[in-house]
Amino acid sequence: MSQQSLPVVVIGAGLAGLTVALELANRHPVIVLAKRQLDEGATAWAQGGIVGVLGSDDSVDSHVRDTQDAGAGLVDEHTARFIAEHSASAVQWLVDQNVPFSHDPSGPLGLHLTREGGHAVRRIAHAADATGRAIHEALLAKARAHPNIALRERWMAIDLITSRHLKRVETARCYGVYAFDIDRRRVEALPAPAVVLATGGVGKVYRYTSNPDTSTGDGIAMAWRAGCRVGNMEFIQFHPTCLYHPQERSFLITEAMRGEGAHLKLPDSAGGGRFMSAHDPRAELAPRDIVARAIDFEMKKHGVDHVWLDATHLGESFLKDHFPTIHARCMGLGIDIARQPIPVVPAAHYTCGGVVSDLHGQADVVGLYAVGETTYTGLHGANRLASNSLLECVVLGRTCAAHILAAQPTELPPVPAWDESQVEDADEQVVIAHNWDELRLLMWNYVGIVRTTKRLERALHRIELLKSEIDDYYANFRVTRDLLELRNLVECAELIVRSALVRHESRGLHFSRDFPATLPVSLPTVLTRPAQSRS
Ligand code: FAD
Ligand code: SIN
């Protein structure tokens, strides 16, 4: 079979995956896999917006500087500059896909720009406080209508098909993917000239997270098993303000609310009043690692289980107009944000590290690409600047598609079918659910916002035990989505802890009580899997 005839397989239907698919589809057939419903994923949950260097008071240099400041010395300047330079065309591309951004007739491109922590100027294009949903609906509508795009909902990629499966001794190459058709309970081999990992982050590895159920690090784990390098996994971003409510602990209260002037305050029992200026001169507009750590510090110091985000002074009509989703969601839980402060806590939010990939999304294995939150490109360094993530998905999604289209066609060998001869059905759901809970609680308590070497070592020990138990299930029982996700989560947990253990300093999102100083010079953490254990 030639490269021309087989579809490219894109794993993931978020902004990264859909951008690649739409850019490929006019010239090449594409299959897009989504392991849950097509509208599930972090993209649809994004609130604040997407960076566009558009204003007359803005510049590429200014955006690069802010990205570097947030990234605490580990941002790759070349990557940051490339992405900043392409931000205006990325926003224009989204406008061309019919994304209904909030308008301001006097704004650049007619768009209203808002501001978030760490940004020197207003440069965030948004659709009120539901930017992700607006983007995702527009792109999904385009993808559904495209005759060259096959959307496969509830199809979960399990592992990449590589040279090892074909028993070929050559430069590592990807030949396709094994994918689990969840409704039909069968695994298919999908051969492909190129495979794109666009599976999002790994927030679900933590007990408390702003992330949707899809964020289980599947792409990172698959790439790692296939022999790709993984970078900067210790840098997990905790968003400072997730709603704290008995019925809701993952709903995000966008940073744009602080950007528009909302204040963080202590509960009355802890003395009340604002506290951020005691931690950073930028107060509520400091980068989010600083804000999250400050909240964590104040909560522990005063023994309180949340702080307040007070937006009451912004006025009811402003809040309803700019933050309609948050207003409605909080009202539904009995919190009138125009009259009451919002109870908030930090929660795991964004995976700054991931599959090492270049500005075309190329990973270490030939024919394998990675785009979006699943990657490590050097843009985010030790801490991501708000609203740079959606931007990275669009800019590098487009360059990735261009690179795939430009590749030389080659003959593909037949790929082996999935081997289920050894497996049996088993009612192990209780044990799998237990392992899920144990892992997530362990990561929250031992590998959270503030770390110590002892806690990391203990976490690693427990993770190794869990891993061998999960590997045993995987080898002997028929796959289920829960088991496959758990297998990926525990792989990523190990990568996070191992990366954290090799960083003997505190920097950006990684804060260790044993190494509180920031070293004068530091490098990204890049892990390589030993060749004999690759799949
Ligand atoms: P996702 O959108 O998460 O999509 C992943 C896709 O992969 C899904 O379709 C999923 O089903 C699929 N998938 C995963 N594993 C498999 C598998 N094994 N097989 C098949 N399919 C699979 N960033 C910003 O820049 N601005 C913001 O305002 C912003 N707000 C945010 C608010 C919230 C609440 C959250 C959680 C994140 C926010 N972010 C924001 C971050 C941003 O939304 C994400 O980083 C970005 O959307 C990731 O896009 P993605 O395409 O890489 O992954
Ligand atoms: C937010 O709206 O606060 C999230 C922005 C982001 O994660 O980039």
Image: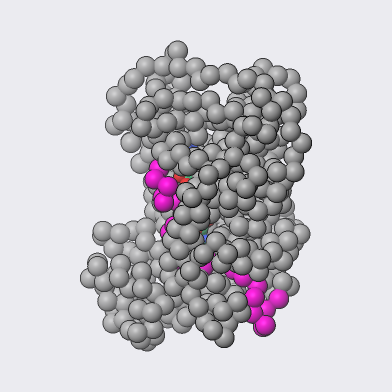
Is residue 479 a member of the stretch shown in magenta? no
Where 244 falls versus 228 (above or below)? below
Main SS of the magenta segment? loop
The front one of 177 and 349 is 177
Whether residue 22 is visible to the viewer of this picture, yes or no, is: yes
Left/right placement of residue 131 relative to residue 164 reads left
What's the residue at 74%, 39% (across, down)? 407
The front one of 354 and 40 is 40
What's the residue at 38%, 39% (across, down)? 436
Quarter of the image where the N terminus is located: top right
What's the residue at 50%, 34% (across, down)? 157
Question: Where is residue 6 shown, x and y percent of the image?
Answer: 61, 32
What's the residue at 43%, 70% (across, down)? 129
Question: Where is residue 345 shown, x and y percent of the image?
Answer: 39, 64
Quarter of the image where the C terminus is located: top right
Residue extent of the magenta highlight = 35-59
Specify the farthest residue to the front: 147
Question: Where is residue 378 shown, x and y percent of the image?
Answer: 68, 54
Question: Where is residue 63 shown, x and y percent of the image?
Answer: 67, 71
Q: Quadrant of residue 191?
A: top right
Whether residue 493 is visible to the viewer of this picture, yes or no, is: no
Left/right placement of residue 486 relative to residue 491 reads left
Where 300 falls versus 495 (above or below)? below
Where 434 falls versus 199 (above or below)? above
Count up the numbered dots: 0
